[in-house]
Image: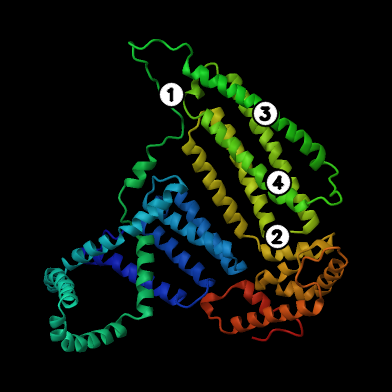
């Protein structure tokens, strides 16, 4: 690309691109909340990368990450969720790293690749300025003399300050002159280096780090040390040492057999209890702490699943994968994975029963998403053991699975889904009414349209033996809800086009409380 342009134009094209990106960054984001601006900026970066490198030159990981960035940024415009903002930023950074290093494959290594690109940016800017000056004779001479004068001037200022601090007479001698000089210099700095200037400079750094490569091949070389399949490592025992009574692999195999038989037996008992207790006909006994059953019990069981995965990773980390007598151990590992899948279903059912009793919430949705990733982790662990795959392969596949799940979660308006579900819950007396007020402004139309259901839940809660919400009465709740609406109206009136989202627009066009919100 740009091969037909003159050499001076090719030299200045990166700087022009960065300046255009910085102007766009400043226009879109200075003093603005994320919204349409984030989508426009992501599209600009993705389009520029595709034009610079060629669409076909982008690797599959780069395309996947950049597509994820566009989807997440679009969801910011539609749902205006914090998860979508986070994933748009993360995906854009990962996509830029993959675009600059096409042979990179793992999301984990895209992070240091991007970080090293930004860390080396100042040095690249210094060197690049010198190269740009080579194409203009006057500027080249000025740059050369500027570099010659700049270092001695900085050193002189340092020593001048030290002498002033160490010699009172010298300080008095130079005080009047310096005070006037610093006053003029300070006014000049205040006029030039404004907050807007530094924001524009920040925009230049962001655009330069995302659009151009400065990082060396170090991160790629680190990743290329790891293959996707395990290789057998042969170690010969020195001939002068006495032969061991037992092959080290056989000893490790026997230890693994004993360990897996023991933990399989323990987990079998746990699974039988859960299948009988949790899977079929579960009811909350009188005085039973469902909160402890779900919150503490769920996370303990999840930790046990993760520890189980680490245990199998340790056993099948090296040559035991190639040992001819490892077949029974492999079967026990498969049984252990299958039992952990059953345990994962039990954890899901615990969470389901809690949702069935107390309604939906962010953490309960997060548990479901995490269990989905645990399921993927167990399946890929089985594939790793079966196909003699490496730990690098396992982490790479699971990182992309987590990326796909998080991007998928940005496509759902979880606040509205939670409120809809909880408003029509079969157990109205146990719904967290305070959580309605803690959610985003997107739920305002739903709450005003269904205020009778909210008040019915309050009335039901007032009959409970223990009242655990802060708004059990309608009037305080309505007052807090009206305050939430008024804050939205004020924010929406002051909002610029850069921060536009369909979520806010939908609220402004929906009848809320008495009449329509007129903005």
Numbered disc in front, either 4 or 3 = 4
Q: Quadrant of residue 494?
A: bottom right
Which residue is tagged 3?
Answer: 264
Q: Position of residue 372 (x, y in %)?
A: 64, 46
First along the sequence among labels 1 and 2: 1
> How are the residues colored?
rainbow
Numbered disc in front, either 2 or 4 = 4
> Of helix, strand and loop, which one carries label 1?
loop
- The CA span between labels 2 and 4 is 18 Å
Identity of the residue drawn at 83% across and 41% down: 280
Do residues under tags 1 and 3 come within 8 Å of each other at their CB atoms? Answer: no
Left or right of 84? Residue 339 is: right
> Of helix, strand and loop, which one carries label 2?
loop
- The CA span between labels 3 and 2 is 34 Å
First along the sequence among labels 1 and 3: 1
Q: Residues within 10 Å of mark 4 (few under 14, many from 20)?
A: some
The C terminus, quarter of image: bottom right
Identity of the residue drawn at 41% across and 73% down: 24
Q: Position of residue 505 (x, y in %)?
A: 63, 76
Which residue is tagged 1?
Answer: 232
Which residue is tagged 2?
Answer: 361
Identity of the residue drawn at 58% across and 19% down: 327
First along the sequence among labels 3 and 2: 3
- The CA span between labels 1 and 4 is 40 Å
- The CA span between labels 1 and 2 is 48 Å
Numbered disc in front, either 1 or 4 = 4
Which residue is tagged 4?
Answer: 297
- The CA span between labels 1 and 3 is 28 Å
Numbered disc in front, either 1 or 2 = 2
Question: Toward the viewer: 475 or 45?
Answer: 475
Q: Position of residue 421 (x, y in %)?
A: 77, 61
């Amino acid at each position: 690309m740009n091969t037909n342009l003159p050499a001076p134009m090719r030299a200045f094209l990166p700087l022009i691109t960065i300046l255009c990106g910085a102007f766009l960054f400043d226009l879109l984001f200075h003093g603005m909340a994320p919204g349409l601006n984030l989508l426009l900026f992501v599209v600009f970066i993705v389009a520029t990368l595709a034009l610079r490198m060629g669409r076909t030159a982008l690797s599959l990981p780069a395309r996947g990450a950049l597509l994820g960035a566009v989807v997440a940024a679009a969801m910011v415009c539609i749902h205006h969720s914090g998860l979508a903002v986070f994933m748009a930023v993360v995906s854009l950074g990962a996509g830029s790293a993959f675009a600059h290093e096409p042979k990179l494959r793992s999301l984990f290594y895209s992070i240091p690749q991007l970080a090293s690109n930004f860390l080396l940016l100042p040095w690249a800017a210094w060197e690049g300025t010198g190269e740009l000056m080579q194409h203009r004779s006057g500027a080249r001479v000025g740059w050369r003399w500027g570099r010659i004068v700049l270092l001695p001037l900085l050193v002189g200022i340092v020593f001048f300050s030290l002498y002033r601090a160490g010699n009172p007479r010298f300080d008095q001698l130079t005080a009047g002159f310096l005070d006037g000089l610093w006053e003029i210099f300070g006014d000049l700095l205040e006029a030039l280096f404004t907050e807007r200037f530094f924001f524009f400079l920040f925009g230049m750094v962001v655009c330069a780090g995302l659009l151009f490569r400065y990082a060396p091949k170090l991160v790629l070389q680190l990743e290329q040390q790891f293959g996707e399949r395990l290789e057998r490592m042969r170690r010969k025992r020195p001939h002068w040492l006495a032969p061991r009574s037992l092959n080290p692999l056989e000893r490790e195999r026997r230890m693994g057999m004993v360990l897996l038989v023991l933990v399989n037996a323990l987990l079998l008992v746990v699974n039988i209890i859960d299948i009988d207790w949790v899977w079929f006909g579960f009811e909350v006994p009188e005085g039973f702490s469902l909160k402890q059953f779900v919150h503490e019990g769920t996370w303990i069981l999840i930790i046990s699943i993760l520890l189980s995965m680490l245990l199998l990773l340790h056993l099948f980390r090296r040559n035991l994968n190639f040992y001819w007598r490892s077949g029974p151990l492999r079967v026990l590992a498969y049984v252990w994975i299958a039992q952990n899948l059953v345990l994962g279903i039990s954890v899901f059912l615990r969470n389901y029963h809690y949702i069935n009793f107390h309604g939906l919430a962010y953490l309960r949705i997060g548990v479901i998403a995490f269990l989905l990733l645990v399921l993927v982790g167990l399946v890929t662990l089985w594939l790793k053991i079966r196909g003699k795959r490496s730990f690098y392969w396992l982490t790479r596949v699971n990182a992309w699975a987590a990326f796909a799940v998080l991007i998928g979660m940005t496509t759902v308006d979880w606040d509205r889904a939670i409120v809809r579900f909880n408003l029509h819950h079969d157990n109205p007396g146990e719904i967290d009414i305070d959580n309605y007020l803690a959610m985003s402004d997107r739920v305002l139309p739903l709450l005003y349209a269904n205020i009778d259901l909210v008040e019915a839940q309050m009335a039901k809660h007032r009959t409970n033996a223990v009242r655990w919400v802060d708004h059990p009465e309608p009037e305080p709740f309505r007052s807090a809800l009206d305050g939430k609406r008024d804050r939205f109206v004020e924010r929406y009136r002051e909002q610029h086009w850069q921060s536009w989202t369909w979520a806010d627009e939908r609220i402004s066009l929906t009848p809320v409380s008495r009449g329509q919100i007129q903005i």
